[in-house]
Image (tube, coloured by chain):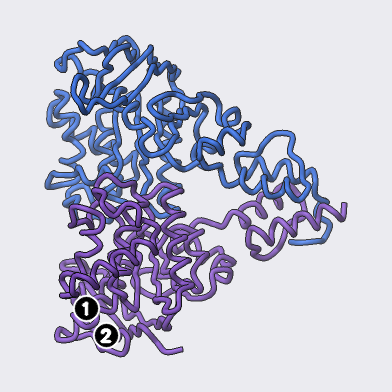
Amino acid sequence: MAITFDHVNFTYQPNSPFAATGLKDVNLTLPDGSFTAIIGHTGSGKSTLVQHLNGLLKPTSGQVQVDDFTLTSTTSNRHLKDLHQHVGMVFQFPENQLFDQTVVKDIAFGPLNFGFDENTAHDMAVQAAKTVGLPDNVLERSPFELSGGQMRRVAIAGVLASQPRVLVLDEPTAGLDPLGREHMMQMFEQLHEEQQLTVVLVTHQMDDVADYADQAVVMGHGEVLKAGAPQTIFNDPQWVYDQQLDFPTATKFAFQLQQKGFSFNQLPLTEQQLADQLADQLPAMDGKGR
Amino acid sequence: MAAMIEVKNLTYHYPEVAQPALDHISLTVEQGEWVAIVGHNGSGKSTLVRAIDGLVDFSEGEVTVAGIKLTPDSVWDVRKQIGMVFQNPDNQFVGATVADDVAFGLENAGIPRDKMIQKVDAALKQVDMAAFSDREPSRLSGGQKQRVALAGIIAMNPSIIVLDEATSMLDPHGRQTVMDVITKLRQSEKAPTIISITHDLDEAARAQRLIVVNDGQQLATGKPAEIFANEALLASSGLAQPFSTRLARSLAQQGSVHPDHYLSDTEMEDWLWQSHLTM
């Protein structure tokens, strides 16, 4: 599903003394099947932006187009059901939203709500549990008995069960250990590849931007400051630095090496890119090292 | 150095769970030491520090904190020695202003008002939050909230500060500011013993010693560089490979020279430059 933002403005509590700008003239295209990372400080408008993707917030002016669905200030809530089904949102710490007695019931809640009958919803839940790598023997257990990492998976399965075409992830790996984080990111990557899901990832992890995203959007003060391929964004280090954004680990390492005297034709963003360019500047293995 | 915390043969089962959360674990933390406890989600590291603070009733074993053996009678004396900062910055505020919040523990301890004001001011200065003392805690950033939580603990002057994934919900900048405060605190005259539970390699690297916990047992302990050098151990503790290790592996795949043992990032930079010069 392709998504377009056309001159979208959003004001919190408009026409009141507390009015505050949430989004300012946002124009953006997320192509069908793309993987977009949204980056920027806490308070830059990242979450406000993604809440427009499934109508949790409606533009004060301008419009958001999700496939053939148009969201404007006047769209009535009754018409949002389709959008809710097709755009799945995984919020921060989604395990806080678990509520049902068993894992499978919790996951089936979405499909049931979207009008699937109980058997179908159950099957969709079992399928989603498999997708996120939950073992069969937890399906009938209480979600609250599970470990933090597994609870997170149950919550994500609950979103995937309705078979959305767009997956919005707001810092989905926060609080997980590094291996758990890597497994989860690989799972999203796989969903993106195999089911051509359009993925929108809100993150502070620049390594994830470098490793997974084909497009990055930098937000600041409710505006899109820059949008483009990660390589394009990071290629202007001074600008990135001025925005007080971080760099991918490999890029930071490359900066240190540049100070020593190494040179890079293209700024490396991943460890693989760094190794490729370093290899040309190092002797071949000749009994030295391993 | 004297032992600040001694854990002997500690075992704890969560109700109705067959696998013990702590399985005959024994360890010692010296006075003034900064120890990082690492391990994957569910390895038992949080249960361990909760047991040390008397927050879980262990079934077997012994805990001694600052020479006090932990019993139902001594639990309050033990807790006076320990200040804990938890993961979620939003779950640990009680005061309407930053200063009120920092004062909460002191009020409970019956400290006279003039002395309390001094202590609150001093603690907020130590965490670089003095300018925020009249602000509402809920309006602060995550990093600022955690530093206020830390100030509340510093004001009580405990012998031990436990950071239970205290930076894991923060953005990189917030994480940095909290770690800087801890580093600064370590340089003060009566530096507290620090126990940080973390998944973050940079945070772990700042500690003097790592304790790797897995399945409720101490799997290994050593200096960060020693633990980082052990790839199998890192994998079983849920920690990421250090960047220098991954880069060395990628270089090997390229058929390029590469170091055959663990190097810190800075050592790796020097090593690469020296190798480049031999070309």
As displayed, is residue B112 above or below residue A63? below
10 Å crowding of disc 2: few (<14), some (14-19), many (20+) = some
Q: Which chain is blue?
A: A
Identified by mark 2, the residue type is Gly
Label 2, on which residue? B61
Across and down, in percent, residue A286 comes to: 84, 57
Quadrant of res B267: bottom right
Q: In the image, is A254 to the left or to the right of B110? A: right
| Residue name at image x 25 percent, y 58 percent | B99
Do the CB atoms of the residues marked 2 and 1 lie less than 8 Å apart?
A: yes
Quadrant of res B63: bottom left
Q: Which chain is purple?
A: B
| Residue name at image x 51 percent, y 66 percent | B206
10 Å crowding of disc 1: few (<14), some (14-19), many (20+) = some
**Subunit that carries the residue with mark 1:** B
Residue A208 visible in the shown view:
yes
Across and down, in percent, residue B152 comes to: 28, 65
